[in-house]
Amino acid sequence: MKPQIFHRFSGQIRLIWAILALVLLAIAPLRAEPAHGIAMYGAPALPADFDHLPQANPDAPKGGTIILAESGGFDSLNPLIRKGRAPWQLRFMLFETLMGRSYDEPFSLYGLLAESIDTPPDRSWVEFTLRPEARFSDGSPVTIDDVMWSYETLATKGHPRYASAWKKVAKMEQTGPRSVRFTFNTPDRELPLILGMRPILKRAQWEGVDFSQSGVDIVPIGSSPYVIDSFETGRSLTLRRNPDYWGKDLPFMRGKANFDVVRFDYYGDGDVVFEAFKAGEASVYRETNAAKWATNYDFPAVRAGDIVLSDIPHQRPTGINGFVMNTRRDVFKDWRVREAMIQAFNFEFINTTLNGGTLPRIESYFDNSVLGADITHPAKGRVAELLAPFADELLPGVLEGYTLPVSDGTERNRKGIARALALMEEAGWTVQDGVMKNAAGTPFTFEIVVSQNATERRQILELYAAALARLGITPTITALDSAAYKERTQAFDFDMAPYRRGLSLSPGNEQKLYWGSELADEPGSRNWMGVKSPAIDAMIDTMLGAPDQEEFRAATHALDRLLTAGRYVIPIWYSNVSHLAHVRQLHYPAHIPMYGDWLGFLPDLWWWEE
């Protein structure tokens, strides 16, 4: 009897263990393990015991002053809200985030304020655990209360860039003395990384204060290596390295934040900035004009070796740089009109005139990278499959292939002008008595707004206006001071404007801000073209939910085709090298990060040494 009872009981135990094993397998995707870092796909490149970032020089000396000359001015010290003009560098140099980005990888984060990150394979939630030693610059500890308050405040009162991700957070909860967990309501593999990069503020400093109001009355307290030392509104801002910075021994920070003082001086426009640099009033100047780089840097300080000329290569996408057409305005709703504007833009002649013909043209938004579509040929494979459901609404060129016009390089651009005239006629516009008009006799004209500090853009527009005159079109070019320019562009109060969007090797939720439908009518969003496309929205969603690199790249290629063939921007040129002129005492590491001269490079990795 006993053996039978034992046998039956043993069988029940085995059944219980089998059921328990199935349950554990079922919930396995919900479990996670603390990690030192996270990558968008796969694992981060550096192990948990890494000594320093590969692009940093761990032996870089501390000390010295770097003076950066900027055009424009500022009237606010809060870069985390939409109101006011704050030095954009404060967003990155004053506040720290839970995780820090390594710009030598497409998209990987490592612990900064947080010592670890937990997230399951499906990334349905993420949990961060703070370092116990994390401190604000006033010596007070960074707490979970500060973290949770910062996230909610930025999402509800901060710049619109923080709101979209917050809408995908179903719950924020403290899970331990130093831990906070975010549970998501939307599948989005990028969300754990995005939330890891939110600036953390000291809650007590903002008690009883309207966070959404700009100004210089409150000097924000952060936890970074630098504090605001002094400022003169609109003229100068000085940051000083905090000798008691809590994170100076972190591997992530070794070889970074090397200057004792970082000073920003503000000038009227780009030409004045260059003259200030030549006069020795600034430490470095970033030259964006290839022709000037070849001809304007033979002044005495360069010949004497006091100024060094450095070329910094990069491997990032071109992004888009050119002139955006606001499709909210009737004048640019028709794609044929937008294509006519592109045909009339004589790129080869303008490039030769301003750059000596040395710079290549941007062919698509993700050009110069593995994420760029083969835009000139028909879509195929998975890219074609992703676009197929939207075939009836796609503009010509998305599926078949699209090619930007190429002129013969002469000023007349006969072929481009002829094609532009034909397209305008198809759209209902013809030249009548030397003026482009519609059937009702209304002239075709539009306003281009440009910052008065943007000297090169104004030169381009003067050449472009001369070409448009051959079509019987006379645009109005309005040069605005920086405050008025920001106000009008944020309110989408323009027909055409200079446009630049830098894109990374890991595009994600920011794509919704750039060209997603949801924020197209939200003042302050970066969707200046006003595009509302279900196909574009679907490709962004596919990118964000892609389970692997192959699906991610296919969705990005499809997005690239939609944006380029949408004819929203007249693209100009790009360079895969940054030109930096700097005083000989400034040095940078031999290992250039894959993003090159980008965020996290200057002044972060540089140092002063005689």
Image (spheres, rainbow, N blue to C red):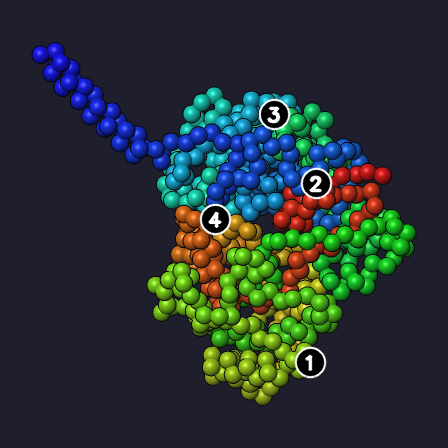
In space, the residues marked 2 and 1 are separated at their CA atoms by 44 Å
Mark sitting earlier along the chain (2/1): 1
Q: Which mark is residue 605?
A: 2
Q: Quadrant of the C terminus?
A: top right
In the visual, does 3 lie left or right of 113?
left
Mark sitting earlier along the chain (2/4): 4
SS of the residue under disc 3: loop
Residue corresponding to mark 3:
135
Image quadrant in which you'd find residue 98: top right
Q: Which mark is residue 509?
A: 4
10 Å crowding of disc 4: few (<14), some (14-19), many (20+) = many
Q: Residue at x 63, y 29 (%)?
A: 250
10 Å crowding of disc 1: few (<14), some (14-19), many (20+) = few
Please provide percent x and percent y for residue 389.
Answer: 34, 63
Mark sitting earlier along the chain (3/4): 3
- Mark 2: which amino acid? Leu
